[in-house]
Image: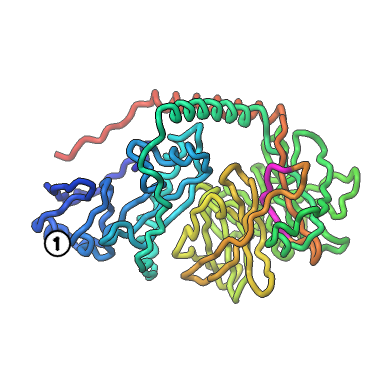
Amino acid sequence: MATRPAGTHDLPPAPRLACAAPRRPGAGPDLTAADLAAVADARLDFLLSFVDAPLSGPVLAVPRFGVWAFGHGPAGRGPGWPVGLWEAFHREPTVAAALHRLGAAGPGPVLRQGVFRTSPHRPAQAAAGVYAECAHWPADVCRQLLAGLALPAGSGSGAPAPAPARGPSGPALLGFAARLAGDQLRDWYRTFLRADQWNMGVVDRPVQDFLRPNGLRGAVVDAPPLPNRNVFYADSFVRQEDGGPMVYFELYDYRTRRGNISRLPYPWQPGRAPVAVLGFPYHLSYPFLFGPYCMPEAWKTNRVQLYDLRAPVTDPTAGQVLLEAPAVDATLLEYQGRYWLFYARADRDPMLNLFISYADALAGPWHEHPQNPVKTNVRSARPAGPFFEADGKLYRPAQDCARDYGAALTFHEVLALTPTEYTEREVAHVTSPHPGYPAGMHTVMALDATRTLVDFKRYRFIPMASLLAVWIRVAGVVGRVKNRRKPVAKSLPAS
């Protein structure tokens, strides 16, 4: 499955079984009785199949947990189509994948599944991302089994809807190639000649109205003016203080390439500059508030820390450590007698995966949820603000990053949240309510009972951001060239 090297590992000699299995047209190999006996003697927990046609027959019942196989994209996209390219041809922003337990009629219960972003101008890179994530899934399922959870039962495949087996005609492919070239030019423009500029604002609607997006039409949005083109305000959170609502947010400056946590009182006061609250020698964002504490994102430290805002904070190590992990957009929830942390991870595609940890006390110990990652979906995994309740139900905001980072918000009703189970269902999809910032939004929370604090973005030409993009691209090319010139150590087979 890999499209790039992932490292090598020294493993003790493992037994190998070479099968001379005959194959029938359109079907998987038929193992002989001797091969089946050899597989049974190995006392395997599962088999992972990579053959084009799924295995069938008696071998499915030999391993303890059956035979597993991957499925990527539409079942009938035709041979030779890289993962995600069929979807890009049809202008679909996402591609689905799944890990199945095979049944007698083909793909059976879904063990893991995900929804990934396509990339028409970088199809190989997008496919590599799908394969890299799917490579984690067998180990994820094994951890679930070791934790005592059962595999899903049933016969539903959960596979993507079949596509026509016949590929496009020659003229259609030429048109597609021309479209790819145009997409590449647009990607260069988006990379070098425009940048995200975020701002925040207050919508004159209660947060519950975001579950019914049509009710947001005509809503008044009150946003503060940004000081200059190089600065933006994002990841806004609010709490009630003595003087009224105080908004905490990420203040990012393209000139320093770093964000700090600042605050402004609401209502916005003309000419009032933000006051810095947390400024460390590394980037800070997503200042989640919990009582008198702030829990900013600082994934490069590999920690989630709580800082007490009742006194000035100057020492980055002064925070209470909740979790040792490169957590992104960590969101804390106190629910049914436990504390829950919902977060993405920088080391496992933060746009794609949702993780949970839980504890009986805020100080810990914290435990990873056995279903982690509990969700793999570029449309709805990454957290986007605190949970809230409506009509006795619990809701989780999330980011939709299918078309772009923070392109929209999705809202989910939490159906089950226990130390062994997490399920949710999407109930609403919301785009930016500000006409001057129509390109996306990625945090939302109640300001009070009648108003909601959100952030949103627009695209602008920002010279410092363009210079930064050029520098990053040049540094990446130089790094790849240096890596190619390094001698590669080759391992020799054991004698």
Magenta span main SS? loop
| Colouring style | rainbow
Magenta-highlighted residues:
438-445
Q: Is residue 437 above or below residue 112?
A: above
Q: Nearer the viewer, residue 92 or 396?
A: 92
Task: Measuring from the top left, give residue 273's x and y in whole percent.
Answer: 85, 44
**Is residue 366 left or right of 222 when viewed as pictured?**
left
For label 1, count other residues whose C-alpha is less than 10 Å away and answer few (under 14), some (14-19) or many (20+).
few
Q: Is residue 486 above or below residue 107?
A: above
- Quarter of the C terminus within the rendering: top left
Question: Which of the 4 image quarters holds residue 460?
Answer: top right
Residue 440 among magenta residues: yes
Q: Nearer the viewer, residue 422 or 109?
A: 109
The residue sitting at 51% across, 66% down in the picture is: 423
Task: Measuring from the top left, give residue 165's x and y in whole percent.
Answer: 36, 42
Task: Measuring from the top left, give residue 292's x and y in whole percent.
Answer: 74, 63
- Determine if residue 146 is in view: no
**Is residue 330 left or right of 142 when viewed as pictured?**
right
Q: Nearer the viewer, residue 256 or 28?
A: 28
Question: Which of the 4 image quarters holds residue 231?
Answer: top right
Task: Measuring from the top left, give residue 207's x and y in whole percent.
Answer: 73, 62
Q: Is residue 365 above or below residue 440?
A: below
The residue sitting at 68% across, 48% down in the picture is: 441
- Give the labeled residue for mark 1: 41
- Determine if residue 95 is in view: yes
Find numbered disc 1 in the image and state the secondary structure of the residue it sits on. Answer: helix
The residue sitting at 64% across, 53% down in the picture is: 409
- Quarter of the N terminus within the rendering: top left
